[in-house]
Image: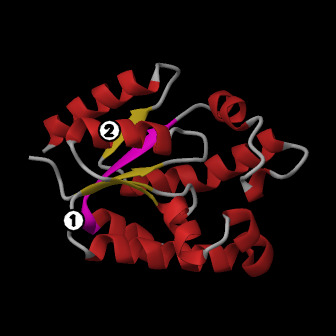
Amino acid sequence: MTPQYIFLVGPMGAGKTTIGKHLADLLGLPFIDVDTEIEARAGANIPWIFDMEGEQGFRDRESKVLTALVSDKQPKVIATGGGIVLSADNRAILKRSGLVVYLSATLEQLVERTRRDKTRPLLQVDDRESVIKQLIEKRSPLYNQVADLVFPSGSTQPLRLAKKLAEAVSALC
């Protein structure tokens, strides 16, 4: 039996959206990306929200979206933003609402995957690697705290990873 909600947590560049879409297809569930949902509800992109409301304003929106997504009781795969675990309330919602998968990746993989990305406000700096390293150090214990399953996103093709993840999820349920 598939859990009601499957949450994908992990740092930016871990593959939450890409693998999540494949996983949802494989499991026959809808897919929701929290960041995309925030943008749709705000009528603005995330960089604009960061510029106008700061990181805290964005985090408040993130928490509201997470709460709304788990209130509809419709099973789905949910890709969260990398910083969703910073809130103790969000961590509690994740833990009690479904299966939480921590998609992990090495620092090198994350740097490479986000190298050309111009949309991530926290990475609009000269030394991206340093920022990513700091984020991993701060957030990794929180990802581990909420995770029911730690799954390396590695360098394998995303659909192949999603198939392995679907098997692992099925084995847990």
Farthest residue to the right: give it. 126
Viewer-closest of 130 and 64: 64
Query: Few, some or many C-alpha atoms within 10 Å of disc 1 (few <14, some 14-19, many ≥20)?
Result: few
Mark number, residue 65: none
Q: Where does the C terminus fall, quadrant-wise?
A: top left
Q: Is residue 85 visible?
A: no
Q: Is residue 4 visible?
A: yes
In the figure, is residue 50 to the left or right of 43? right
Q: Residue at x 24, y 49 (%)?
A: 29
Query: Few, some or many C-alpha atoms within 10 Å of disc 2 (few <14, some 14-19, many ≥20)?
Result: many
Eyeballing the image, is 91 above or below 149?
below
Q: Which residues are magenta?
A: 96-104
Q: Residue at x 71, y 34 (%)?
A: 111
Q: Which residue is identified by label 1?
A: 74
Of the numbered discs 2 and 1, the one sitting upstream in the chain is 2
Is residue 121 in the magenta section?
no
Mark number, residue 23: 2
SS at badge 1: loop
Viewer-closest of 33 and 94: 33
Locate residue 60, reporting x and y percent: 57, 80
The amino acid type of the residue labelled 1 equals: Gln
Q: Residue at x 16, y 37 (%)?
A: 170
The amino acid type of the residue labelled 2 equals: Leu
SS at badge 2: helix
In the figure, is residue 1 to the left or right of 66? left
Q: What predominant SS class does the magenta segment belong to? A: strand
Q: CA distance from mark 2 to mark 1?
A: 16 Å
Q: How many marks?
A: 2
Farthest residue to the left: give it. 1
In the figure, is residue 89 to the left or right of 3? right
